[in-house]
Image: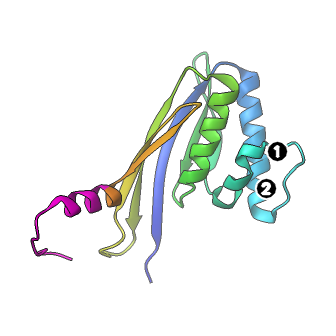
Amino acid sequence: MADYFTNFSVVINLASKAQQAYALDLADKATIAHRDEQLPEDFPEALKDAIEDWQFETEANESGTKHGLWLHSTYGGVDAVRAFIQHLLQKFDPQRYVAFQWSHDCSKPRTDAYGGGAAVITAQKIKTISTGAWLQKEIARLPALEPLAA
């Protein structure tokens, strides 16, 4: 049996300790809700759909005078982390953006197990690309050639 992984790691710098505390508290609530499906009444509406995919860790990241978050995972949660980051941008810093990448991996060599993607997130928009989608797009552009590898 093979184990599949989706890895990412990104640090977000926030402007204050209060912003960091808000984000850590929100992530705690989401993690608890992911485990037992009980959402607090004051949980942001925009993040409710992300709870099912909330499979990432959120830790305080103190670096000099910056108050940040370290968001990381080995098991996925890319959709949820994008929604969480966008929520924080909307609430605290709509003039900034966050960009990060992720990888798909497997404990055994499987032809469908590798790839990844990237995202650029602003308060208004989330733009992503995946290596799988890029491959399909490029293959569709080829003339009627036969593939050598499957």
Residue 80 painted magenta = no
Q: Is residue 88 left or right of residue 140?
A: right
Q: Which residues are magenta?
A: 134-150
Helix, strand or loop status at disc 2: helix
Q: How is the image coloured?
A: rainbow
Q: Identify the amino acid type marked 2.
A: Ile
Q: Which residue is mark 2?
A: 32
**Residue assigned mark 1:** 43
> Where the C terminus falls, by quadrant?
bottom left
Task: Give the class, few, some or many, for how many residues have Cα within 10 Å of label 1's Cα (few <14, many ≥20).
Answer: few
In the rendering, at what x and y percent does residue 93 appear? 62, 22
Give, as a three-letter code, the residue at label 1. Phe
**Corner quadrant of residue 70:** top right
Q: Residue at x 64, y 44 (%)?
A: 58
Q: Percent position (x, y) of residue 42?
A: 87, 42
Q: Quadrant of the N terminus?
A: bottom left
* Residue shown at 29% from the left, 74% from the top: 111
Taking the image as shown, residue 130 lies to the left or right of residue 37, namely left
Q: Position of residue 69 (x, y in %)?
A: 61, 34
Of the numbered discs 1 and 2, the one sitting upstream in the chain is 2
